[in-house]
Image: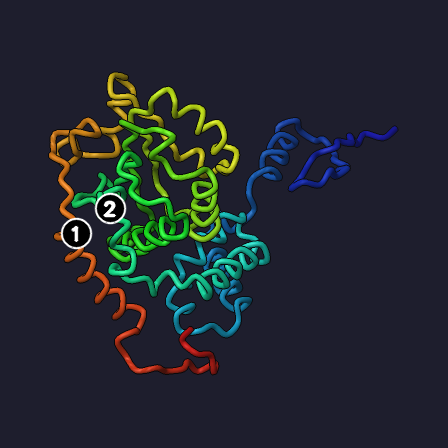
């Protein structure tokens, strides 16, 4: 008589037939618990993570000076985490971003090239941070002043690059505050532009967003959102918060992420929101110099040891 028990157990995506001798029911339970526990997976093993980072860096091969600056260990980790520490999958999406950066050249955009887009203060970097020390971008669609899709995108990309440049050490993400008071289909960017912005954000600024606050959305916004949300991926969607000024939960959410003393009254805080284009332009020009130094624009052309040019 066979005293063995056969059990079909799913293990790591594979259904396996196991032959188990039951000496004690507790042993069987322990075996199941042990088998289903992660066995030194990269997501919970620091040494394994470091190994994956090295493997991804090796897979990337020779890189230009700028690409090397971009591909920090933190950058590689973000892409690996997004793909469950699968080096091949992380390599694919990172190479796509490097290709995009080599053609779009976001680090080369200067404030004077996009300053006209910012004259009304439709998008700008706030003079305060969220509670985690993250850079905050404020957006006011009501202040839309141009209809040029490409220039709108370049302006936003410039500000995202600037926000990242000014992140404190150890911080990888930024926060967005979008004031939807006065929003209308006439002042908002076209759906195509919104879709293009989402594509760039979700494909080439992966995991750079901590939270997106859609503040005081009017009912008419729902029609626009029903179309746009189909282009929003799950990970991005999870970071979007609809906030209503008279809703208690919304108020508590804002307090969780932002200090009311710093938060402008337009977003339920106590501070005054004031955008002065000339002063902001002065600050951006200063940051352009810092950006040039970081990317090496202020130095003479050079080549890395792999024989690749800066671009």
Q: Which residue is drawn at 37% across and 19% down?
A: 219
Q: On the rendered structure, is 289 left or right of 63?
A: left
Picture quadrant where residue 23 is located? top right
To which residue does mark 2 refer? 124
Q: What is the crowding at mark 1: few (fewer than 14 residues within 10 Å), some, or many (at least 20)?
A: some
To which residue does mark 1 refer? 280
Q: What is the crowding at mark 2: few (fewer than 14 residues within 10 Å), some, or many (at least 20)?
A: many
Asked if residue 308 is positioned above or below residue 212 in the image, the reply reads below
Picture quadrant where residue 310 is located? bottom left
**Residue 167's x, y, as percent?**
26, 53
Are dots 1 and 2 in contact, CB under 8 Å? yes
Q: Residue at x 37, y 44 (%)?
A: 147
Q: On the rendered structure, is 208 left or right of 299?
A: right
Q: What element carries label 1?
A: helix
**Quadrant that contains the N terminus:** top right
**Quadrant that contains the C terminus:** bottom left
The residue nearer to you, when weighing 124 against 15, is: 124
Of all residues, the one furthest to the right in this rendering is 1
Q: Residue at x 38, y 30 (%)?
A: 185
**Residue 306's x, y, as percent?**
47, 81
Q: On the rendered structure, is 47 left or right of 26?
A: left
Q: Distance between the residues labelled 1 and 2?
A: 8 Å
Asked if residue 185 is positioned above or below residue 57 in the image, the reply reads above
Q: Which colour scheme is used?
A: rainbow
**Residue 109's x, y, as percent?**
32, 62
Considering only order in the chain, which callout, 2 or 1, is on the residue closer to the N terminus? 2
Tell me the number on the disc at residue 102: none
Q: Which residue is drawn at 28% across and 17% down?
A: 247
The residue nearer to you, when weighing 230 against 5, is: 230
């Amino acid at each position: 008589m066979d005293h063995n028990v056969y059990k079909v157990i799913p293990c790591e995506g594979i259904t396996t037939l196991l032959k188990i001798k039951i000496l004690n029911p507790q042993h069987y339970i322990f075996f199941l618990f042990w088998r289903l526990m992660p066995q030194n997976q990269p997501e919970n093993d620091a040494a394994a993570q470091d190994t994956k980072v090295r493997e991804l860096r090796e897979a990337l091969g020779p890189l230009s000076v700028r690409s090397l600056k971009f591909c920090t260990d933190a950058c590689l980790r973000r892409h690996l985490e997004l793909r469950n520490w699968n080096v091949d999958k992380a390599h694919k999406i990172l190479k796509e971003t490097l290709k995009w950066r080599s053609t779009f050249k976001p680090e080369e955009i200067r404030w004077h090239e996009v300053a006209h887009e910012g004259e009304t203060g439709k998008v700008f970097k706030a003079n305060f941070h969220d509670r985690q020390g993250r850079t905050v971008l404020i957006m006011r669609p009501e202040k839309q002043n141009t209809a040029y899709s490409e220039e709108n995108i370049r302006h936003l990309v410039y500000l995202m690059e600037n926000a990242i440049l000014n992140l404190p050490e150890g911080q990888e993400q930024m926060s967005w505050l979008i004031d939807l008071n006065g929003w209308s289909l006439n002042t908002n960017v076209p759906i195509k532009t919104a879709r293009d912005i989402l594509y760039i954000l979700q494909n080439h600024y992966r995991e750079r967003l901590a939270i997106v606050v859609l503040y005081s959305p009017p009912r008419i916004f729902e029609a626009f959102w029903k179309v746009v949300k189909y282009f929003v991926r799950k990970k991005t969607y999870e970071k979007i918060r609809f906030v209503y000024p008279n809703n208690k939960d919304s108020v508590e959410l804002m307090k969780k992420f932002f200090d009311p003393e710093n938060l402008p009254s337009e977003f339920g805080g106590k501070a005054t929101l004031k955008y002065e284009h000339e002063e902001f332009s002065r600050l951006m020009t200063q940051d352009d110099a810092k950006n040039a130094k970081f990317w090496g624009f202020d130095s003479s052309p050079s080549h890395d040891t792999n024989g690749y040019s800066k671009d």
